Image (tube, rainbow, N blue to C red):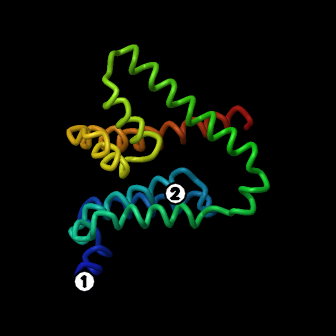
Amino acid sequence: MEENARRFRTGGGDCWYFARALHARSRGFPDDGDHPVYHESRARRILCATHSRAAHDLPDEYFLYVFAVAVGAMGNIVQIFNSAGMYFVYVALVLFGSFLLHAALCALFNIDVDTMLIVSVSAICSPPFVGVAAVSIKARKLILPGITTGIIGYAAGNYLGIALAEALKALGG
């Protein structure tokens, strides 16, 4: 186990060194940890670390548990309850609106219901939940396409989100 931990820390070769260089490059930006280049470099280092052999030796559910705990730990329950009304309305509007738009586009292009459900789970919940959804509707053949669309969505969403934030900042927002 200690050998796996050492290999995990050292990362995955050239990919790891590229991510380290990108992270070093982000040091020239404001050090408040809120600059898009800083977040992008951290995301690249995490992606590179997943290519190490030690990461592949971990149990399948390990990363899902770490993800769930990390996201849950970031929440401030008092703040959520104090301003819950607007947050819940906004989240409900975004989630249901995107689901309805997705369902309408699938109907327009004659995409079957199973594929629509798997891709929706991938987009709304995240790729790790695709397997559970695919097994529950007995559509195992859609696991790989569902995970792929979720990862592509993450990659495109990173850059679209940064572009939108910069555009809004330029407009004075």
> What secondary structure is found at the residue carrying circle 2?
helix
Q: Looking at the picture, does residue 77 appear above or below residue 126?
A: below
Query: Label 2 sits on what residue type?
Result: Tyr
52 vs 61, left or right, is left
Give the x, y percent position of residue 158: 47, 43
Q: Secondary structure at mark 1?
A: loop
Residue located 59% across and 61% down the image = 33
> Is 144 rendered above or below residue 128?
above
- Residue ID at (37%, 64%): 63
Figure quadrant of the C terminus: top right
| For residue 145, side relative to residue 67 (left or right) | left
Residue 13, percent from left and from top: 23, 65
In front: 152, or 70? 70
The residue positioned farthest toward the top in the image shown:
108
Look at 54% across and 50% down and name the residue there.
Answer: 36
Distance between the Cα atoms at labels 1 and 2?
A: 31 Å
Q: Are marks 1 and 2 in contact (CB under 8 Å)?
A: no
Q: Nearer the viewer, mark 1 or mark 2?
A: 1
Residue 99 picture location, percent across and down: 50, 30
**Residue under pointer 1:** 1
Whether residue 160 is situated above or below residue 68 in the rendered picture: above
The foreground one among 35 and 108 is: 108
The circle on residue 38 is 2
Give, as a three-letter code, the residue at label 1.
Met
Furthest residue to the bottom? Answer: 2
